[in-house]
Amino acid sequence: MSRSVKVRPTSLALIIGLSVFSGKAVQAADTPSASTIIEQGKYLSVAADCGACHNSPTSGAAMAGGYAIASPMGNIIASNITPSVTAGIGNYTEQQFARAVREGVNAQGDHLYPAMPYTSYSKMTDSDIHALYQYFMHGVQPVDTPAPATKLPFPFSIRSSMALWNMLFASQQRFTPDSQKSAQLNRGDYLVNVLEHCDACHTPRNFLMGQKNDLALSGGQVGSWYAPNITSDKTAGIGSWSDDQLFQYLKTGHVAGKAQAAGPMAEAIENSLQHLSDDDLHAIVAWLKQVPASGATATESRFTQGAPSDSEAAMRATDHPDAGWVVFSNSCANCHQANGEGSQFYPSLFHNSATGAAQPDNLIATILFGVRRHADGQYVAMPAFGPAASFVDRLNDQQVADVANYVLKNYGNASLTVTADQVKTVREGGPVPAIAYLSNPAVLAIGALIVLVILGLIVTAVRRRGKK
């Protein structure tokens, strides 16, 4: 015979209260706090390298804009993305913010230029967009000074033309983890191809400046610099690097006998990569090491070319020494040593990615613009010998070509020869893509003439058909 159990009203109320309280406790434990989301957004902004472009180059104010991003079409000025309601994005809704980040369209409906890597950010998850929005709205100090406007020449000044470019080269597909890959590889994929947007520099582009994604990460021109092949190819790429070497490079920008970060890569390490967690850096390494080899044409690795040379000392007794030796002896040998082996503070000139590469762009750019890198608690600097150098240190195009050839022939890829014209091209911002010629008045005039001729032929054909 069963017995009924009576529960006192006070006991029942206590049980219900405890149940409700415990449910809320579980819910609270599962839901990140506002401060946690803001902190997550801050980390994401570092991983996405937002500050590299949007931090003010004059005041240093975070996300205040004003930095001039050099492009073949002209300088693109990074906008103020602080929560200022007068000069920044303080009036943006989260949906408007998401559209700007993912689609490159601001709250006013104007198209952004792809110097803002929205073609990579388009794959960003909803939760990361939300965290970024919360950080920019509540974790960044508003700056009420507007950034200067971008003024590109016609026809690039017509921002609406970017809609057609986006149809050709942009995608709105979100990142989807690959169930066949580990959590670490999926995280590495997301970091490399979304947040860090490595493909934006290391992938070659077509004549319209769209990425050739069938050659992803196989190397691409970035203004005066060349972003090398970082696929798993053991000769052309980074397949011969150990995991520890790749991790060290991403953390410090330096691996003896391999490479030293300069130019845009030094900026990426200084502003973003060195601040990532070790787990995230290991995820990037794991992903890169399994990227299929692509664009491999090199017969010898850029990291193994060259050897020490005694030519600098031998030429001191020569009546008419090589012109490149004169520059090297006066400007380079003191730091890099006469035999090119470098020192504790200055890298070797052989087994060096800048001197052993298949193209001389990075060697030329390093001579012209120098090296500046804050990483791993150290400041690394090499003086520039181009336009920013003092008058007594400044080298002309022929002198840069001479010293580059001396270094290549004695310490690096001896098959290359640098000309003064190549130096001039690098000095002026690198090779000009075909699309940039559209702003040339002569090209515009010829284009207009062709259009008029075509229209004339159409009108003539229509009239003849009408007479029949």
Image (cartoon, helix red, strand yellow):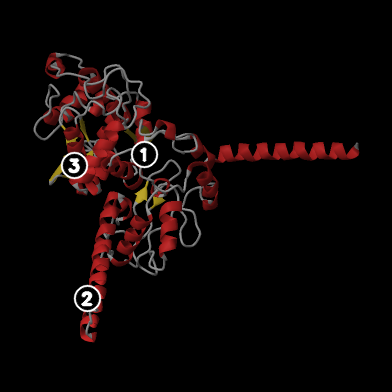
> 402 and 36: which one is in front?
36
Mark 2 lies on residue: 18
Q: How many marks?
A: 3
Q: Residue at x 29, y 58 (%)?
A: 41
Residue type at numbered disc 3: Lys
Question: What kind of element bears circle 2?
Answer: helix
The answer to whether one can see residue 369 in this image is no
Q: Which residue is mark 3?
A: 251
In the image, farthest residue toward the left: 344
Q: Quadrant of residue 135?
A: bottom left
Residue at position x 21%, y 21% in the image: 304
First of labels 1, 2 by sequence position = 2
Inspect the image, locate mark 2, and give the three-letter code of the amino acid beneath it. Leu
Task: Pick the residue in front: 139 or 334.
Answer: 139
The residues tagged by marks 3 and 1 sit, at their Cα atoms, a distance apart of 19 Å
CB atoms of marks 1 and 2 within 8 Å? no
Earlier along the polypeptide chain: callout 2 or callout 3? 2
Residue 212 vs 60, above or below: the answer is: above
Residue 199 tag number: 1
Assign a secondary structure to mark 3. helix
